[in-house]
Image (cartoon, rainbow, N blue to C red):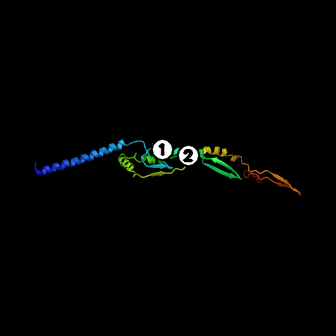
Amino acid sequence: MTKMGKKKKKGLVAALCVIAVIVLLAAAYGIFCLIIEDDKIWADASVNGVNIQGMSKKEAAQTVEQKFEEDYKDTAVTVELDGQQYTMNVFPMLGMDASAEIEKAYEKGHGNLLVRGLEWVEMKRGKAEKLSYDVQPTVAHPDEVEGIVQASGIQDYNSMQDTTYEVTDTGLIVHKALPEPDRMWMP
């Protein structure tokens, strides 16, 4: 074999070794990405101030719901009418659905297989973006409104004023009652 042939052969062996190392590293990375798959939220994420990192989607939903109940269980609306106050506990009609936000947080590290390993390393190094979501309550149970209003006692309000009179030294003064606006008679 000539000197030139030996150089080509050495170059070919070196190139094959480099390719083999690259293939082995790619295979190791792929296996690593498969191994790190789990059902936990990797992202440093919070929903309404509740950190959900390290929880499963179900655990995160339960924790966020518990915080929602703590924050809103005493939520009430007070209506003042003719000097009387009527308080309505509105919590039974409220609801909150944070599932979309929890799903967004879960997606980090559970999406594309080839990106998963990089996201895991980023998360472990503390370099991952912090995610924060605010979810507002909504009227999820409108069928509860009637019961809430009834429980307040506001429906017992009577705006009808009684006809009164007063006797003075010189006469009788009659104060005629005012009908309720919705029952006013028009000729």
Drawn side of residue 18 relative to residue 7, left or right: right
Residue at coordinates 56% horizontally, 45% vertically from top-left? 70
Q: Look at mark 1 in the image and give the residue it sits on.
A: 60
Q: Look at mark 2 in the image and give the residue it sits on.
A: 70
Q: Nearer the viewer, mark 1 or mark 2?
A: 2
Q: Would you call the spot at circle 1 few (<14 residues within 10 Å), some (14-19), or many (20 or more)?
A: many
| Quarter where residue 29 is shown | top left
Residue at coordinates 49% horizontally, 45% vertically from top-left? 99
Mark earlier in primary sequence (1, 2) = 1
Q: Secondary structure at mark 1?
A: helix
Q: Secondary structure at mark 2?
A: helix
Q: Could you tell me which quadrant the C terminus lies in?
A: bottom right
Place of residue 16 in the rendered image (x, y in percent of width and height, measured from the top left): 21, 47
Going by the numbered disc 1, the residue's amino acid type is Ala
Q: Nearer the viewer, residue 180 or 162?
A: 162
Drawn side of residue 93 relative to residue 85, left or right: left
Which labelled disc corresponds to residue 83?
Answer: none
Going by the numbered disc 2, the residue's amino acid type is Glu
